[in-house]
Amino acid sequence: MKHFYYVGEQEKHNIFYRQPMEFSKHTPKKILAYALGALLYTPGTREHISKDVLSGKYLSGSYAGLTSMVLCLEDSIGDHEVKKAELNVITQLQNLARALESGVLSRSNLPLIFIRVRNTLQISALVAELGSAAYILSGFVLPKFLPENGELYFQTLQDVNDRYSQKFYGMPILESPEIIYRESRMQTLLGIKALLDQHHDSVLNVRIGGTDFSGLYGIRRNNETTIYDIAVIRDCMADILNVFGRSENEYVISGAVWEYFNGNPKILKQRIRQTPFRQGAEETGLQIRTEITNRLEDGLIREVLLDKVNGLVGKTIIHPSHIKTVQSLQVVTKEEYLDAKAIIESAESFNGVMKSSYANKMNEVKPHYNWANKILIKSNIYGVFHEQQSFINLISSKREERIFV
């Protein structure tokens, strides 16, 4: 699998100073943790999951670019649908495994697949039912994760990994009342951190359940505001980043879900700057900006940019029209790349301050070292833009017949 595989080779050459690398579930965790990008959630009851992958739905057109997905057996289905969803998920994954083994599906076109379970019993039962097809899974999403249930989750993961000679990762979701309620938050977060540190090699991402947090307060952001505009959620996210984003024994933390995808009339003035869209062909760029903002992508873009500046990587999505926007915004700029490269290369012999090659900032080797390491990992996974290129060049790739459905 590789990000932006839907872009033609000549266009990639024009857009990327450094092109994205290939990755799979067997890629070292340190790199793979950054690679999920736009993680698409789909209900486990959906009967066309394997058909959508096999038909090439995610290889071209408006939904191109899928590299990771979650089949959900938790909040996206009714309690009365659990058995039906379990059987369907097993069927869909076995279909994909058969397609791989027969050569109908290429491994490079198979996204990383995770299952969001309700409990540990589902993990053991699903892996057993999948049998020889279990290798198609990359891991499990662990909802309502707390110190009280977390140890059993990871014990179960270790058991199935040992029993079936697999490497299934766990992705805890922080979304419970104990985490957002101020009086219990820090004790709970530190308890979770201590638990995850014991199983660090099995934790791929830490994910934030913005929808569940909002629901506890009867809050729902609209399509023109970001999760950061909700004070109580922003406050909680700051503490999550404080605990799990520290450089020592750090975890990759992913952005909260963006839940809007249809075009209602806009209320607020468009707030995306015109500058990135003016680069290159100005008239075409501004037309693309209008199309994006008319489809409510401005809220998503602003939220992803805020995710990035706060150290989050990737995002949970619930509609494939968000894939290109989220993934394109993960690409590293050439300026970031050259700064990071200079910092890392200087670290062994020089620990002071040096002027950026762009002559617009000072790079301090010691305080910027961890930032530089992350940038270089992301540059391998998502690539590096040429100067004067930006996310809009990927969204408007010439091989695409249209930008949005």
Image (cartoon, rainbow, N blue to C red):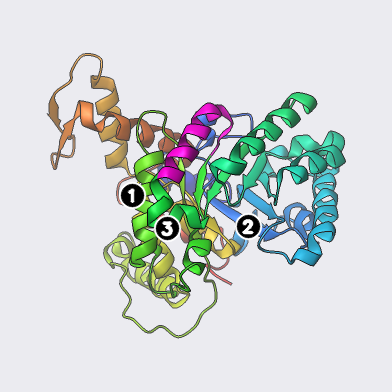
- Disc 1 designates what residue? 310
In the rendering, at what x and y percent does residue 216 appear?
50, 67
For the residues carrying marks 3 and 1, which lies nearer the camera in this image? 3
Q: Quadrant of the N terminus?
A: top right
Q: Is residue 390 visible to the viewer in this orientation of the structure? A: no
Count neighbours of disc 3 (C-alpha within 10 A) and say few if under 14, some if 14 to 19, many if 20 or more: some
- Disc 2 designates what residue? 41
The residues bearing labels 3 and 1 have C-alpha atoms spaced at a distance of: 21 Å
**In this picture, which residue range is highlighted in magenta?**
187-204
Q: Amino acid at mark 3?
A: Tyr
Q: Is residue 154 visible to the viewer in this orientation of the structure? A: yes
- Disc 3 designates what residue? 181
In the rendering, at what x and y percent does residue 97 appear?
82, 41
The residues bearing labels 2 and 3 have C-alpha atoms spaced at a distance of: 26 Å
Q: Against 19, is 119 above or below?
A: below
Q: Secondary structure at mark 2?
A: strand
Q: Secondary structure at mark 1?
A: loop
Residue 365: quadrant of the picture = top left
Q: Are marks 1 and 2 in contact (CB under 8 Å)?
A: no
Residue drawn at 68 percent across, 44 percent down? 109
Q: Are marks 2 and 3 in contact (CB under 8 Å)?
A: no
Residue 244: quadrant of the picture = top left
Which sits in the foreground, 346 or 401?
346
Disc with the residue nearer the chain's start (1 vs 2) = 2
Q: Amino acid at mark 1?
A: Asn
Q: Against 18, is 365 above or below?
A: above
Disc number for residue 250: none
Q: Against 314, is 374 above or below?
A: above
Answer left or right for 50 relative to 327: right
